[in-house]
Image (cartoon, helix red, strand yellow):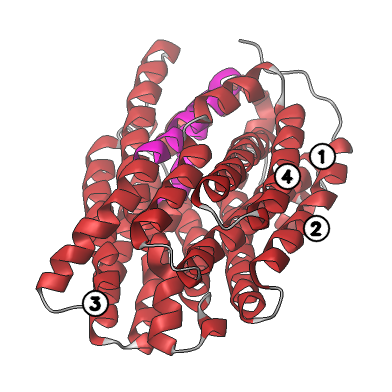
């Protein structure tokens, strides 16, 4: 859909004001959306094990959700090139809200099949929350891009605290209705997505894509208006490959170990409140230091931040199986979240740097398609591993083995001059 040239201000000062307001709205949307997502993620493995009656299928609900995230990211990112970022993200969140409410009824009725169908559509809302970081990157110049992106990711700090805290109250609420307590978090997910959809529909004005095109013409010159490269051509770019490898690997390892931690603790007779505390520690690590990682990525460059994130992720995987106690698990999962954050922020910024405006929708959607697909595979494999003799120890070792090659990939990325402050 062609953009109206009057839809964005040509004045850089006016664009900067719009960018600050849009970034702030995306920060709030990340807070609302991630709170609902994290609440549901806290009980996903338990839902899989209890509704299916088979421990090996405990990872299936999270895997189906991640498939929904992957497909949704590709579909809605492509749609955003036609109908704009505002329209696409709003529609994605409404779809996710409908899926979450259907998941609520599926768990309450004990229908595993209905839950799986519903969770596929729930993933659409999560994909919109994740794509918001690229919108923030799009409306800000390169010198502030990683910090703007990190500001949006920082919104997950609110979700990291509020999300697990919603598990108990929503569980008590639906229990009073005569339903299983593990249905409650899906009520929080639906409400969070609905509120986020309303916020973005009102706040993403002027159209972020138009602002991004104006910035790109100033930063890249005639290259900004060049025809978009194909996905195959883009994957020949080392910066693109490194960015995707970093984000996909970190997310796959993080989701796989995170999801199986709740099942691991449940099997050790930890109460739901302990599980929620570990998830709070983990998600605090995921989001609370986003501004630091964004500042470092803008100041030092993307490469050293990616390398640091990979090292921390590897160490956390080795630490997690060492003790079943609450405090050691909380520390290991905190480090897992921190390593993910460094890779996620710096990798997403590196990808945004490498793309022309016409390439952003297709390649960022392709990136998140791989992210969701890898996470789905990790949770599926995680369920099978947890059912085996190695259990949680094998999960940690496999996560470390998957992370190790990322160190080599990042080391081969050419040093780039950090963006000017």
CA distance for labels 4 and 2: 11 Å
Q: Is residue 290 above or below residue 179?
A: above
Residue most toward the left? 177
Which residue lies under the disc numbered 4? 315
Q: Is residue 310 above or below residue 96?
A: above
Which of discs 2 and 1 lies nearer the camera? The answer is 2
- Can I make out residue 229 in this image? no
Is 148 inside the magenta-drawn segment?
yes
Q: Which residue is mark 3?
A: 180
Q: Does residue 284 belong to the magenta stretch?
A: no
**Residue identifier under label 1:** 410
Q: Residue at x 20, y 61 (%)?
A: 170
| SS at mark 3 in the image | loop
Rendered location of residue 117, percent (x, y) = 38, 81
Tell me: residue 64, above or below residue 209.
Answer: below
Residue visible at 63% across and 36% down?
342
- The crowding category of the residue bearing disc 2, from other C-alpha atoms within 10 Å (few below 14, some 14 to 19, many at least 20), is some
Q: Secondary structure at mark 1?
A: helix
Q: Which callout, 4 or 2, points at the residue further toward the start of the chain?
A: 4
Q: Which residues are magenta?
A: 129-158
């Amino acid at each position: 859909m062609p953009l109206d040239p009057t839809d964005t201000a040509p004045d850089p000062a006016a664009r900067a004001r719009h960018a600050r307001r849009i970034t702030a709205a995306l920060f709030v949307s990340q807070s609302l959306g991630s709170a609902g997502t994290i609440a549901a993620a806290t009980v996903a493995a338990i839902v899989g094990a209890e509704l299916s009656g088979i421990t090996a299928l405990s990872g299936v609900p999270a895997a189906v959700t991640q498939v929904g995230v992957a497909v949704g990211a590709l579909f809605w990112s492509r749609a955003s090139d036609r109908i704009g970022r505002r329209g696409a993200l709003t529609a994605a969140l409404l779809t996710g809200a409908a899926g979450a409410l259907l998941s609520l009824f599926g768990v309450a009725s004990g229908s595993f099949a209905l839950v799986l169908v519903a969770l596929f559509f729930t993933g659409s809302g999560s994909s919109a929350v994740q794509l918001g970081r690229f919108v923030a990157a799009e409306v800000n110049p390169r010198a502030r891009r990683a910090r703007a992106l990190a500001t949006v990711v920082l919104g997950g700090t609110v979700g990291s605290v509020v999300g697990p805290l919603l598990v108990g109250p929503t569980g008590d609420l639906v229990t009073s209705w005569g339903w299983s307590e593990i249905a409650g978090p899906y009520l929080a997910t639906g409400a969070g997505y609905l509120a986020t959809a309303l916020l973005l529909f009102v706040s993403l004005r002027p159209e972020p894509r138009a602002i991004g095109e104006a910035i790109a013409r100033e930063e890249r010159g005639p290259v900004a208006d060049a025809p978009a490269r194909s996905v195959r051509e883009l994957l020949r770019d080392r910066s693109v490959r490194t960015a995707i490898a970093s984000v996909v690997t970190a997310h796959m390892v993080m989701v796989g170990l995170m999801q199986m931690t709740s099942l691991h603790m449940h099997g050790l007779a930890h109460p739901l409140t302990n599980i929620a505390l570990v998830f709070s520690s983990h998600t605090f690590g995921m989001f609370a230091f986003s501004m630091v990682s964004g500042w470092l990525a803008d100041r030092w460059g993307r490469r050293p931040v990616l390398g640091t994130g990979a090292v921390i992720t590897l160490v956390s995987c080795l630490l997690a199986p060492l003790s079943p106690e609450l405090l050691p698990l909380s520390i290991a999962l905190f480090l897992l979240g921190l390593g993910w954050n460094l890779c996620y922020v710096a990798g997403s910024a590196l990808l945004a740097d490498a793309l022309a405006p016409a390439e952003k929708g297709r390649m960022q959607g392709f990136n998140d398609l791989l992210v969701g697909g890898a996470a789905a595979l990790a949770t599926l494999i995680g369920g099978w591993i947890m059912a085996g003799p190695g259990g949680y120890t094998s999960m940690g070792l496999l996560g470390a083995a998957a992370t190790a090659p990322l160190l080599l990939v990042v080391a081969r990325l050419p040093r780039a001059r950090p963006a000017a402050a």
